[in-house]
Amino acid sequence: MAGRDTGSGRGRVAVVGTGPGSMDHLTPAAEKAIKSADIIVGYKTYLDLIPELLVNKEILSSRMMQEVDRCRKAVELAGDGKKVALVCGGDPGIYAMAGLIYEVVIENNPDVAVEIIPGLAALNSCAARLGAPLMHDFCAISLSDLLTPMELIKKRIHAAASADFVIVIYNPKSKKRTEHILTARKIILKYRKPETPVGIVTAATRKQETIQLTTLADLDKAEINMQSTVIVGNSTTFSWQGVMITPRGYRSKYSI
């Protein structure tokens, strides 16, 4: 179900989540929004994953770190009466463009209509590749300190680890930011056993997808990059035949 449509302008911006990358995991609603748009705006890497939907479309692509520019352009075009699809990977409401587009609309043209089209988030697609690691309470923490101070990120890791949440780590590593995942590991080890299962999925559902199942003790040896999502198990998570499972608690209450 798409997000609530707001605004009364003739033009509109549909913020579209395309999921993890493969066309098989793109929702019909997302496909419809892209096909019905006059103009497609997005980060080039994400647009390159859906070439069949861009045929005969006007495309405005840009590089990483230009999110504000993309949103401003999308709102400007919608203000001129265009139907704009602002494309995001994963889900637009999770570390993506949904919040920013509203901020830009509020500041620049409140009459522009906004619709949020959800997509399969990284935590969903990566969890499925790993088995069933998110069956109990979990949280997501981004290690990117571009917009959030590292001290606040550390505080959140301490809180999540001490509360025994399964922890989904977004943006674990980049070319410049290589130590943050090691810092996270060090903090979590204060609360979790070294043998705690950790799953790493890189480029989920894409041709270059890789899946690693390791432990908190050996996380520092794992191959992790900008396309990786890391899932750290809680105190009950276990590994079995190459998958990662967090029990919901049925065994303590029912005969299985």
Image: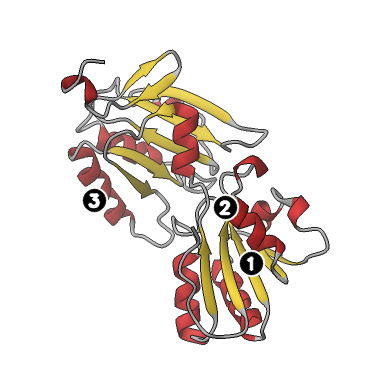
Q: Can you tell which quarter of the image residue 185 is in?
A: top left
Q: Is residue 207 left or right of residue 104?
A: right
| Residue bearing the label numbered 3 | 155
Which badge, 3 or 1, comes first in the chain's sequence?
A: 1
Residue visible at 67% across and 33% down? 207
The colouring scheme, among rainbow, by chain, secondary structure or one colour, is secondary structure
Kind of residue sitting beneath label 3: Lys
Near-viewer residue (229 or 83)? 83
Residue that badge 1 annotates: 85
Rounded to the nearest whole Å, what is the CA distance between mark 3 and mark 1? 36 Å
Secondary structure category for the residue under label 2: loop
Residue 215 visible in rendering: no
Q: Are marks 3 and 2 in contact (CB under 8 Å)?
A: no
Asked which secondary structure carries label 1, the reply is strand
Q: Which residue is mark 2?
A: 89
Sort mark 2 into few (<14), some (14-19) or many (20+) by Cα contacts within 10 Å.
many
User: Which of 182 and 199 lies nearest the eye of the viewer?
Assistant: 199
* Residue appearing at x 46%, y 74% in the figure: 102
Q: CA distance from mark 1 to mark 2?
A: 13 Å
Q: Quadrant of residue 252?
A: top left
